[in-house]
Image (spheres, helix red, strand yellow):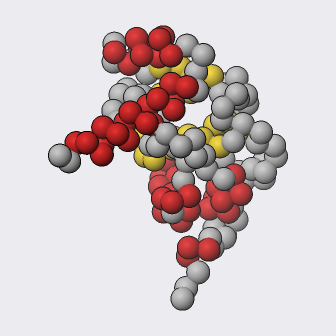
Amino acid sequence: MATKPARSLRDAGQEWLLACTDQPTRVRRAWNADRLAPFDTGTHWRVVEAPLLMTLHAMRRIGSARLGPVLADAETDLAWWLVHSQLDDELDDIRQLTVRPAGWVLKCPPVLSLLGGRTWLERPDGTGRLTDPVLLGAAFGPGGTRLPTEVPA
């Protein structure tokens, strides 16, 4: 019984992720062969790269209800945040973040699997929700601006 919600999450998140590529068959083949699958960025979302430890702190500060998918690679100590494809210069002044250009390739594991050292810290949930770059910038910005969820009561 406990596997049904996880399966539903995987199905919805995985279907959403597969809808973000024009080559879903190629992606499925890679995953079936236990390989990371390439996703071209820019059409559905862009990628913001950050150090893994800082990402973990930022995720806590933003809060799970407002996170979009976040992919991590423990071997390289990096994480990748998925943000809207029309990202402009909102994050240009945050030195800890690297905004990858449209067309950059992100190699992803399946939604509920660890593969090649990569796993989803925040999994795609099937809704298409992405992390708001304003919240991301605030979580990484100078002095670690307090987000609304952190304001003391």
In this picture, residue 85 sits left or right of residue 126: right
Residue 11, by quadrant, is top left
- On the image, the x and y values in percent for residue 10 come to 37, 36
Residue at 66 percent of width and 59 percent of height: 135
User: Could you tell me which residue is drawn at 51 percent across and 60 percent down?
Assistant: 65
Q: Is residue 44 visible?
A: yes
x and y, in percent, of residue 3 in the image: 22, 42
User: Quick one: 113 or 9, which is closer to the camera?
Assistant: 9
With respect to residue 75, does 50 lie above or below? Answer: below
**145, 150: nearer the viewer:** 150
Left or right: residue 3 compared with residue 61: left
- Of 141 and 85, nearer the camera is 85
Q: Which quadrant of the rendered structure holds the C terminus?
A: bottom right
Residue name at image x 66 percent, y 35 percent: 45
Q: Is residue 43 left or right of residue 77?
A: right
In the picture as drawn, the residue positioned furthest to the left comes out as 1
**Res. 114 in view:** no
Outermost residue toward the right?
89
| Residue positioned 78% across, 51% down in the render | 90
The answer to which image quadrant residue 13 occupies is: top left
Q: How many numbered marks appear?
A: 0
In the rendered image of this protein, does residue 124 appear above or below residue 67? above
Q: Is residue 25 above or below residue 78?
A: above
Q: Position of residue 98 (x, y in %)?
A: 68, 41
The percent position of residue 120, horizontal first and vertical second, equals 43, 40
